[in-house]
Amino acid sequence: MPYRYISKRLGPLLALVVVGLGLFALSLGGCSTARWTVKPHQRELLADRIMQPDGNAQETAADDHVLSNREGAIGGSGTSGGGCGCN
Amino acid sequence: MRLQLRSPRRGTAALFGVCELLALAAVTLPSATARATQDAAARVTFFREPSKENNGINVVHPQLDLGTTLGPDFHFAAGYEVDIVSGATPAVFGPRTTGVDVVTAATKFSDTRHQVHGALAYQRPTSSVALGYSYGWESDYRSSAITGSTSSDLLDHNFTLALSYTHNFDSVCDANNSNIGDQLLDLKPLGRSDHCFKSAETDVATRKLAIDTFQPSLSWTATPKLLLQLGSTIQILDGFQSNPYRSVLVGMQHRTPQEHMPEYRQRYAVYARAIYALPAVRASGLFMARLYQDSWAVQAATGEIVLNKYFGSSLLVTLRGRYHLQGGASFYRDGKGYLELGPGGKYWTGDRELSPMSNYLTGGKVAFLRRPEQEKTSWFVEMELSAKYELLLYHLDSPDAPNADRTKAHIFQVAFSLRF
C-alpha cells in the first residue's frame, strides 16, 4: 500500500489542492450567477479550436511522450475534460 | 468541440459567427438530437537526438486513433501506437573528461514498443464520465493501465471541474540479482532481453512497478475572451524504476554496478494556464506555468507560450516556445563525482532526467483545415492535415553529465485527421 509512504511535506500540499479545488467548485453555487457567467451567445470566441486548452488529445499525448522521457518533471498539459464549457 | 473560424471575407466582426451558432446549439439542444459522428486521426512523430560521438537516438512514433458515437450519450475510442527506437548509448555512465578506460564506446540497441488503448465515455450536456484501458508491451517492459475520468460543468458552463485517475500495473525485466544480498555494488545489469518474461529462464527476473496518477483541474471561462485553468498532477510510483541495462562507474576502484534508484517516488506538480483570444487578428495565445517537486528532491519550473493564428479560411499556423529548468535528484552526481567521491548513499544513477539541467523548445506547426459547413454533398465534417517541427536544446551543468554528447533534438511530426 504505497499511500503510507506519503511524505510529511507533500501530503498536506496534495490535500490542500484537492480540498481547495473542491471547496472552490462548491462555493460557486452560492455566487451570483450574473456576476460570474459568460452567456452562451458570448462564447463564439471560446468555442473555436484555438481556444481549447487540450484541443487535440493525440497531439498532446505525443508531445508529452517526448518531453516526459527527457525531463524530471511531469504534468502541466491539462486534464481530459477541462475546457470552456462549450460542449 | 472543434470548430473552425469561417472565411475572413465575411468580415472581422463576425469572425467567430459560425462557432457562436454551433456553440449555442451545443449547449441548448438536447443531447438526443446530436448526430452520430466518427473520427479518425493518424500521426507520425520522428525524433532525432544526434550525438557528437555516436549514432545518437532515433525514434519513430506512429499513432492511429478511431472514435465513434454510440447513440446519443456514448462515445467509444480506440487507438494503437508504436515506438520504434534505435541508436547507441554507453552501457556504463562515467566521466568523459578523465579518460577512464571503463567508459567504452556506445552500445547499439533497438527496440519496439506497442500500445493499444480504448475508452468508453458517457456524455451528458453538463457532465461526462469515461473509463479507459491501455496495454503496452515491448521486449523488456509490459504495462497495463486503467483510467477513470469525470468532468462536470458548473454554473452555466462557466466552470469545468475535471478529475482523472490512472493506475498502472507494470512489469519490468531485470537481471536476476537475487544472490547478491546487501552487496549493492555487485548488482549486475541486464545484458539482453530475449529471456525476459519467460518463467523457465533463471538469469532474469520480473520486477513490478505500480503507478498511481491523480489529476484534478478547474477551468474558468473568465470572460468571453479569456479561459483560465488551474490543475495539478500527483503521481506515486512504487517499484523498480532503474534502467536495468545501465551501469554506473562508482569509486576509485572502478566498480560498475547496475544503476540503483529508490523504489518509491512521489511526484507533485501544479500548473496554471491562460488562453486569450485576439479576434481582431484571428489569433489566440496560450500561457502556461508549472512548478514541480518530488520525493527525490527534484524541483522544476516550466513556462510555455503557444500562439495560434489563422491565415485565410484554411490555414492555421502555430508557434510554440517553452523553457524548463530543474534541479537534480538528491542522489545524483555527475560522472566525475561518482568516480572520485563514490555514491552519496546507496543509490546512483546515470539518468539525464535526474540531473540539474534546462532545456529550450521552439518550433511551429502549419495545419490545413477543411470544413465544408453548408455543402450537403460533402461526406466529411472536418479534415485536418498538419506538419510540425520543433527543436529541443539541452543545457547540462557539467561536461560529465549523462548524455552530455547529445545537446539537441529535432522533432518532426505529420498528422491527418478526419471527422465524418
Image: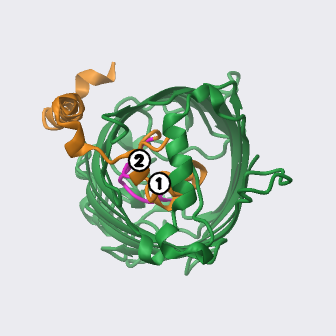
Q: Where does residue A7 sit, x and y in percent of width and height? A: 18, 33
Q: Nearer the viewer, residue B376 or B268?
A: B376
Span of residues in magenta = A65-79
Where, by quadrant of the figure, is residue B32 drawn? top right
Q: Where does residue B214 sit, x and y in percent of width and height? A: 37, 33
Residue type, label 1: Gln
Residue B408 lies, with reference to residue B39, above or below; the image says below
Chain A color in figure: orange
Question: Mark 2 = which residue?
Answer: A84
Q: Where does residue A76 sit, x and y in percent of width and height? A: 36, 52
Residue type, label 2: Cys
Chain assignment, label 2 = A
Q: Is residue B116 left or right of residue A37?
A: right
According to the colouring, which chain is green? B
Q: Nearer the viewer, residue B377 or B217?
A: B377
Mark 2 vs mark 1, CA separation in Å: 7 Å
Q: In the displayed image of the protein, which residue is found farthest to the top?
A: A1
Q: Is residue B167 left or right of residue B303?
A: right
As for residue B13 lying within the magenta part, the answer is no
> Magenta span: helix, strand or loop, mainly?
loop
Q: Where does residue B226 sit, x and y in percent of width and height? A: 33, 59
Question: Mark 1 = which residue?
Answer: A52
Q: Can I make out residue B409 in this image?
A: no
Residue at position x 35%, y 61% in the image:
B225
> CB of mark 2 within 8 Å of CB of mark 1?
yes
Question: Reading the chain from its start, which is encountered first: label 2 or label 1?
Answer: 1
Q: Nearer the viewer, residue B36 or A75?
A: B36
Residue B417 lies, with reference to residue B101, above or below; the image says above
Residue at position x 23%, y 37% in the image:
A33
